[in-house]
Image: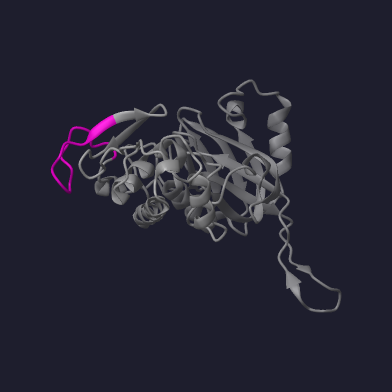
Amino acid sequence: MPELPEVESVRRGVDEWTAGTTITGAEVADPRILGTTSQRRIDPSAVSGFVSAVTGAHILKAERRGKFMWLSLGEGTVLASEPGSGACSPPRPELGILVHLGMSGQLRVHSPGEELHRHTRAVLHLDSDRELRFVDQRIFGHIGVQPLVHGYGRLVPASAIHIAPDPLEPAFDPERVVAELKKKRTAIKAALLDQTLVSGIGNIYADEALFRAGVHPLAVPTRTRKSRLTAVLESATKVMSDALAVGGTSFDALYVNVNGESGYFDRALLVYGRGGQECVRCGTEIVKITVGGRGTHYCPVCQKAPRYR
């Protein structure tokens, strides 16, 4: 599943190609892409409703919170704040096209004449003589139009209002997160995956952050020093920033950016996916266990098991 660095890499590419353009039309090749994985029976009117809602809309910018990405839509005109004042303000977005990549979703920019990939599920036609295509082999992702509402200091799609700020956005408050994390009685690995606490961290970067901070994945936050919890958050921020710098982590051809290029952070992973291999720090064999139903990797020497009285 793409995590913050991968989604941000895609967002940057989408924003570069679509911000300031107008959607001149849309096609939905597979109506299932308009629903979530738990809602695959789509009302036939949903397709026409989606096409009608986005056609003629102006894309202000591509935005993201955690793993959620959306295109903010507006009128495409600059409005004067006061008659005769000469002062102007950008149009206020009210709708957004939410795009969830799921496990295999891709947003690809193409020229209209280029051949469609066989897993293309939806296409947005732009007035820039480009197309934004949603390609999804497994159809675990989805796309749809939603109203934008206020959530943690900014406008977000209605379905993402419960998603907490991520470590790379201004609204992120590490002290608040540490205080909330300190209340958790579950394994810290599971707590880091709670998107209502801190968003953007998934399986890969949780393992990497815990290793860098020297914290065992089964450590219980409420029984862990705040300084160590702070170290975990700082490590998560650093490892995701490092991954973003090289385009994220790609294990196969399913994750690519808008130009079809892969990320290269998999070459820098220290524990994730390295079960049975030697620790890069101490040479001990990396162990793989299951925490909260997720495969979890750690070094038993560098991340000593907690001892609680």
Answer with left or right where residue 168 lies relative to residue 227.
right
Residue 134 vertical position relative to residue 39 in the rendered view, above or below = below
Q: Is residue 23 or residue 146 the one in the foreground?
A: 146
Q: Is residue 293 above or below residue 308?
A: above
Which residues are drawn in magenta? Answer: 272-288
Give coordinates of residue 130: x percent, y percent: 55, 50
Q: Is residue 35 left or right of residue 272?
A: right
> Image quadrant of residue 54?
top right
User: Is 190 located above or below residue 267 in the figure?
Assistant: above
Residue 123 x %, y %: 58, 39
> Which residue is at the far right?
83
Q: Is the N terminus in the top left, top right, bottom left or bottom right quadrant? A: top left
Residue at left offset 61%, top offset 24%? 39
177, 107: nearer the viewer = 177
On screen, residue 25 versus residue 33, left or right, reads: right
In the image as oriented, which residue stretches furthest toward the left? Answer: 283
**Label total for image:** 0
Residue at the outermost top position: 41
Horizontal arrangement in the rendering, residue 207 relative to residue 82 (left or right): left
Residue 192 lies in quadrant = top left
Q: Position of residue 244 (x, y in %)?
A: 39, 54
Q: Decide whether the magenta segment is chiefly helix, strand or loop.
A: loop
Residue shown at 46%/39% (left/top)? 191
Whole-percent x, y for residue 12 in the image: 49, 55
- State the image quarter where residue 61 is shown: bottom right
Q: Which is nearer the eye, 171 or 27?
A: 171
Whether residue 129 appears in this view of the structure is no
Q: Quadrant of the C terminus?
A: top left
Is residue 15 in the magenta section?
no
